[in-house]
Structures are given as C-alpha cells and as structure tokens.
C-alpha cells in the first residue's frame, strides 16, 4: 500500500513538472525573437520575412531595443494598461508638433514591443490650431489596448476632450485623459470601446463646457489638426 502511494505521489510530481516544463517551453518559443508571436505580427504587417522583436528588461529597454537608440527621443509619459505599458515619446522640435505611442507587452521573461504609431505635423501656422490627433485602430488576432486616439493640446483653453460616436443608434461618448507633461505642454488620449467604429467625432471643450473645436473622423488610421471654431 505504501509503495502504491509513493508511486502515485511520484506520478503526480512528474505530471506537474512536465506541465510546468511544457508551459515554459511554449512561452519561450512564443516570445523569443522570431518566435510564434513575432510570426503572427509579421503576418499582420504583411511581411514576407519574420520580424525579430527583442525582449527587454523594462518597457523602455524593450522599445529602445526594437526602435534603436535615439538619444533625442524623449519619453514624456507612461500609462499602465492591461498586459503592459503605453509609452508616449516626443522629439524636441520647433518646426513640428509630434507625438509617438509605443505599447510594450509584459511577458514572463521580460517586455516586448507590441505595437505603436506616431505623427509629425508642421507648425507653419500653429496659432490657428488648438488640438492635433492620431487614431490607431483595434488589431485583429493580436492582444493590444487599442483602439486609441491621442494627441497634443495646442491651446490651453482646451480643458476637456471627448471621442463620440453612434453604436446601433445609441450615442457613445468616451472622455479623454489630459496629462500635463511639461511647461505649457499637455497631451490627451482615450481608449474608445472596441465597438466604436468610424465615423467618430473628436470634440474639445473650454472651461465653461463650450465646444471650442470638433471634427468628424472617417478614417480609423487618421491624423491631423483641429482649429478653433470661433
């Protein structure tokens, strides 16, 4: 009887060890540079060859390894999201309004770049613009926090930003988060529900709740500027 119990215990231990080993092996082949997750990403990007996304010790390190070392690129804000971190970066420039977002996904053995995008818009006549923006759509078959709409607040009169749409005839409004990232520098971003599709409308409000600017967006991969409506 004792021998039978010992055999059962050893069988249970062996099953547990094999299960853990199998899990770790799958995680390794999935997350390693050029692994299964990178193959899925490559297919989404329409690439013939597999992209090799390196693993970093931190979100910043993962983005730097993937994008390359650019000393002029400044990380101005970080927002924790489910399964990872969104990093907002900017290149100092007096000639353009620019902003980039990078999603770093937390993995068992570190962090990996998951998706991102950005824009640069000439400031030839900056005084007429109050907001700029970019939209990144939801990705099929890859887990990310997107869709996302984000941008710079160019006029301090803007105190609120919303993204609004109609879903099955019902009005849906999502409030953006405004973050001061430096002297006279504010960014805004919002994660609309995945059910929100184009067209959607971006609205900017002043302190009195009056709409200062609005724009209908019909392209889910759009970027641009918004002027004062007055």
Image (cartoon, rainbow, N blue to C red):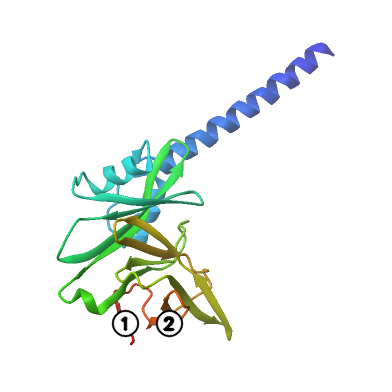
Q: Is residue 12 above or below residue 105?
A: above
Residue 26 x %, y %: 49, 39
Residue placed at 79% from the left, 16% from the top? Answer: 4
Q: Quadrant of the C terminus?
A: bottom left
Kind of element beneath mark 2: strand
Task: Left or right? Give the position of 25 relative to 216.
Answer: right
Residue 53 percent across, percent down from the top left: 32, 46
Tag 2 or tag 1, which sits nearer the N-term?
2
Q: In the image, what residue occupies the spot 47% across and 37% down? A: 108
Can you tell which quarter of the image residue 44 is in? bottom left
**Residue placed furthest toward the top:** 2
Task: Please tell me which residue is depicted at 42% across the width and 76% down the height of the picture.
Answer: 206
Residue 202 placement (x, y as % from top left): 41, 77
Disc 1 crowd rating (10 Å Cα; few below 14, some 14-19, many 20+) is some
Marks 1/2 in contact by CB < 8 Å: the verdict is no
Residue at x 45%, y 44% (from the top left corner): 106
Along the viewing direction, whichever of 196 and 34 lies nearer the viewer:
196
Q: In this view, does 59 lie to the left or right of 73?
A: right
Q: Position of residue 28 (x, y in %)?
A: 44, 37
Mark 1 lies on residue: 228
Residue assigned mark 2: 211
Can see residue 26? yes
Can you see residue 139?
no
Mark 1 → mark 2, Cα distance in angstroms: 9 Å
Name the quarter where the N terminus is drawn.
top right
- SS type, badge 1: loop
| 133 or 27: nearer the viewer | 133
């Amino acid at each position: 009887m004792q021998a039978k119990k010992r055999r059962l215990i050893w069988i249970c231990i062996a099953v547990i060890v094999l299960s853990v080993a199998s899990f770790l092996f799958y995680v390794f082949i999935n997350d390693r540079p050029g692994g299964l997750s990178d193959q899925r990403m490559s297919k989404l990007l329409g690439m013939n060859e597999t992209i090799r996304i390196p693993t970093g010790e931190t979100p910043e390190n993962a983005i730097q390894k993937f994008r390359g070392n650019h000393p002029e690129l400044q990380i101005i804000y970080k927002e924790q999201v489910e399964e990872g971190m969104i990093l907002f970066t900017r290149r100092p420039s007096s000639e353009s309004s620019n902003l980039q977002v990078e999603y770093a996904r937390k993995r068992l053995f570190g962090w990996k770049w998951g998706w991102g995008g950005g824009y640069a818009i000439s400031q030839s006549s900056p005084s007429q613009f109050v907001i700029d923006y970019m939209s990144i759509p939801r990705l099929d078959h890859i887990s990310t926090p997107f869709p996302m709409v984000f941008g710079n607040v160019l006029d301090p009169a803007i105190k609120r930003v919303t993204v609004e749409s109609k879903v099955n005839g019902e009005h849906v409004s999502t409030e953006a988060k405004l973050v001061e990232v430096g002297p006279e520098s504010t960014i805004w971003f919002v994660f609309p529900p995945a059910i929100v599709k184009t067209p959607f409308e971006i609205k900017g409000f002043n302190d009195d709740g009056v709409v200062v600017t609005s724009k209908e967006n019909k392209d889910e991969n759009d970027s641009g500027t918004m002027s004062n409506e007055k």
